[in-house]
Image: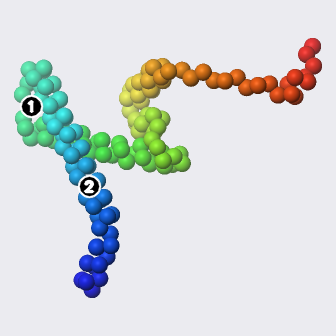
């Protein structure tokens, strides 16, 4: 039985490598996020004239990671529910449905982003022969 498992493991070598690489990438991203949160928490504490203890900073970093992880799952589910494989801004806005203030900020941000996009000129449709045959009064 162990020999069969070894053979199956050998057959999936490429898949195992991909999973291992994805896990390493996820670990790297998690560590970078935590370092950024630690830096922000420490900096904000100093601005307020307070010293934030290391266990509190670690707790804030863990909470931020878990929140972002849940956010990522939610936006993925919203996109799947809409029948899409890619996440759109509307999915991100939907994740804030329990926080009206945050949802408003996200909508404003989204509108600002749309305003910065280069406007694409739409070509006018050529009038059809039916339109040409309509009598004008």
* Tag count: 2
Circles 1 and 2: CB atoms closer than 8 Å: no
| Label 2 packing within 10 angstroms: few (<14), some (14-19), many (20+) | few
Task: Report x, y in % for residue 87.
Answer: 45, 41
| Label 1 packing within 10 angstroms: few (<14), some (14-19), many (20+) | some
Residue 44 lies, with reference to residue 60, above or below; the image says above
Task: Report x, y in % for residue 28.
Answer: 21, 46
- Is 42 or 24 nearer to us in this picture? 24
Can see residue 100? no
- The label number, if any, that marks residue 52 in the structure image: 1
- Is 84 or 73 nearer to us in this picture? 84
- Is 124 or 81 nearer to us in this picture? 124
- Image quadrant where residue 128 sits: top right
Q: Find the distance from the CA under tag 1 to the CA under tag 2.
A: 35 Å
Task: Report x, y in % for residue 133.
Answer: 91, 24
Task: Report x, y in % for residue 137.
Answer: 93, 13
Q: What residue is disc 2 on?
A: 21
């Amino acid at each position: 039985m162990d020999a069969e498992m070894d053979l199956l493991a050998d057959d999936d070598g490429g898949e195992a490598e991909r999973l291992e690489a994805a896990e390493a990438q996820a670990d790297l991203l998690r560590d970078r996020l935590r370092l950024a949160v630690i830096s922000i928490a420490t900096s904000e504490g100093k601005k307020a004239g307070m010293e934030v203890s290391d266990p509190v900073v670690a707790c804030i970093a863990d909470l931020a990671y878990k929140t972002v992880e849940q956010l990522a799952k939610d936006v993925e589910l919203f996109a799947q529910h809409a029948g899409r494989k890619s996440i759109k801004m509307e999915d991100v806005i939907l994740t804030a449905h329990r926080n009206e203030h945050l949802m408003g900020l996200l909508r404003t941000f989204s509108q600002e982003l749309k305003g910065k996009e280069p406007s694409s000129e739409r070509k006018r449709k050529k009038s059809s022969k039916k339109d040409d045959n309509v009598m004008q009064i």
